Amino acid sequence: MKEKKNSRIEITELFMAKAGNDWNRCYHGTIKREHDVNGNPVVYCKIKIGNGYIYATAPNQWELGKKLDEMVLLILDYNLHEKSGNGSLVNLN
């Protein structure tokens, strides 16, 4: 069977970030799996929270989940999106 070149089907994997142990503060977004220039696996995620988005990348889904959970707490409990700054990225490692 010959494959169609312009297939309209795209599989999307969903991912969740949770603020602490509170299941009422869960947010869902999309996850994308790729490889970097050295062939190492990389996972990307984008989740909408309120009026903004959080983006994260990690070598695997478990590290990605930890980073996203921490960012959700920063946004909800410490108003990270409401504070102005110089646009520097926060390193959560």
Image: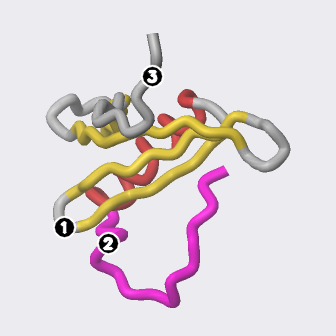
**Farthest residue in the front direction?**
2
Residue holding disc 2: 81
Q: Which residue: 27% across, 57% down?
A: 76
Give the residues drawn in magenta, as a range.
78-93
Q: CA distance from mark 1 to mark 3?
A: 40 Å
56 to the left or right of 7? right
- Is residue 73 part of the magenta span, yes or no? no
Q: Are marks 2 and 1 in contact (CB under 8 Å)?
A: yes
Residue 16 placement (x, y as % from top left): 33, 34
Find disc 1 in the rendering and name its residue: 51
Q: Disc 1 or disc 3, which is closer to the eye?
A: 3
Query: Residue most toward the right?
Result: 38
The amino acid marked with disc number 1 is Asn
Residue 3 lies, with reference to residue 8, above or below; the image says above
Name the secondary structure under disc 2: helix
Within-10-Å neighbours for mark 3: few <14, some 14–19, many 20+: few
Location of residue 66 in the rendering, given as x and y in whole percent from the top left corner = 51, 37
Q: Which mark is residue 3?
A: 3
> Which residue type does callout 2 highlight?
His
Q: Is residue 81 above or below residue 83?
A: above
Q: Which mark is residue 73?
A: none
User: Of the residues tagged 2 and 3, which is closer to the observer?
Assistant: 3
**Secondary structure character of the magenta stretch overall:** loop
Horizontal arrangement in the rendering, residue 31 relative to residue 75 (left or right): right
Image quadrant where residue 25 sits: top left
Instruction: Say what secondary structure mark 3 lies in.
Output: loop
- Location of the N terminus (image quadrant): top left
Distance of label 2 from label 3 (alpha carbons): 45 Å
